[in-house]
Amino acid sequence: MTITQLQYVLAVAEHRNFTLAAEKCFVTQPTLSMQIQKVEEELSILIFDRSKKPIQLTEIGQKIVNQAKNIVNEANRMQDIVEQQKGFIGGEFRLGIIPTVMPTLLPMFLNTFIKKYPKVKLIVEELNTEEIIIKLKNGHLDAAIAATPLMEEKIKEVVMYYEPFMVYVPTNHQHFQKDELEVDDLNLDEILLLQDGHCFRDGILNLCRNTNPNKHTHFQLESGSFETLIKLADEGLGITLLPYLHTLDLNEKDKLKLKHFKEPKPAREISLIYPKTELKIQIIDALRSTISGVIKGAIVFQNVEIISPVSKK
């Protein structure tokens, strides 16, 4: 059997559909089906149960797929070894970034990175944490930038910086006159939140888990945009929490409404994450070095308490 045949097997295992798998592999469906049948005949087993919709892996098929992933990864590693030996940093590199980091961090490092490493074709996707984990495991991303710790067995996390939470308090709010806030000052029912699926939202919920909610709330609103939350806070509809880097772009008037937490400041941990197979590690290291170089002057807080980005439902 060949590496290409194993790649076809992995495509069908992922998409559970021969036609879709063939499209993703840029071959005709009969060609893909024939090659997979050859693998099954060579091994004298059935990898897929074609009687079910969608197609399912057989029990032995799941074991074959697990081994095929290892073989394909090791084949890719050989090319990596050659490129590292030559000192070559280039080729296609797929990077995922969570939505609450993308708008602030990407402009800080992207121009520097592409100028320093012009042979790298960087493909950036904005994805939530769950999507990133799935794509990393399926080999559709080479690395990602996300809030950690995630505690994923097959994913390595390299911490790049700690980003404190800031509180945006409108001028008519009872806490506006305070210089610093404590977590106990927060009332979860008046905090305007990002919509479900954002790890920053989960971090706030984890931070406020032990606060006393107000049972007389009149409405609940969730948005996918920090800008929307800020505008609603200014309308007197509550307060909101923002990641520190996002606050740097606020106008001077709005910056007056920002409140720090008392130390240790609640913060999120932002890491570069990638599969433990460490494919394309030379590009990963270049990316980490570039980001560390541009971020060290922006994040200067030391005494922080890391808030988990994982929902504790």
Image (tube, rainbow, N blue to C red):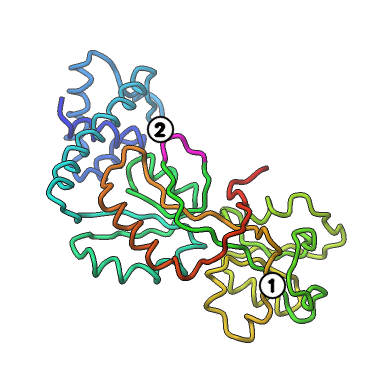
Q: Residues within 10 Å of mark 2 (few under 14, many from 20)?
A: few
Secondary structure under the numbered disc 1 in the rendered image:
strand
Q: Mark 2: which amino acid?
A: Pro
Residue located farthest toward the right when viewing the structure as drawn = 216
Residue drawn at x 51%, y 53% as measured from the top left: 147
Residue neighbourhood size for the residue with mark 1, other residues' Cα within 10 Å, grouped as few (<14), some (14–19), many (≥20): many
Residue farthest bottom in this picture: 253
- Magenta span: 151-155
Horizontal side of residue 95 vs 175, given as left or right: left
Q: Nearer the viewer, residue 34 or 313?
A: 313
Disc on the earlier residue, 1 or 2: 2
Residue 54 is tagged as 2
Residue type, mark 1 in image: Lys
Q: Residue 13 falls in which quadrant of the image?
A: top left
Residue occupying image coordinates x 68% and y 72%: 168
Which label sits on residue 229?
Answer: none
Q: What whole-number distance in Å separates the C-alpha atoms at marks 1 and 2?
A: 52 Å
Query: Is the residue 3 above or below the residue 232 in the image?
Result: above
Q: Quadrant of residue 181?
A: bottom right
Give the x, y percent position of residue 67. 30, 25
Principal SS element in the magenta part? loop
Identify the residue at the far top of this view: 44
Left or right: residue 308 versus residue 69 is: right
Determine if the magenta segment contains residue 15.
Answer: no
Question: Disc 1 designates what residue?
Answer: 259
Q: Quadrant of the C terminus?
A: top right
Q: Please report the residue visible at 27 percent of the width from the left and 28 percent of the height from the top.
A: 68
Count the labels in the image.
Answer: 2
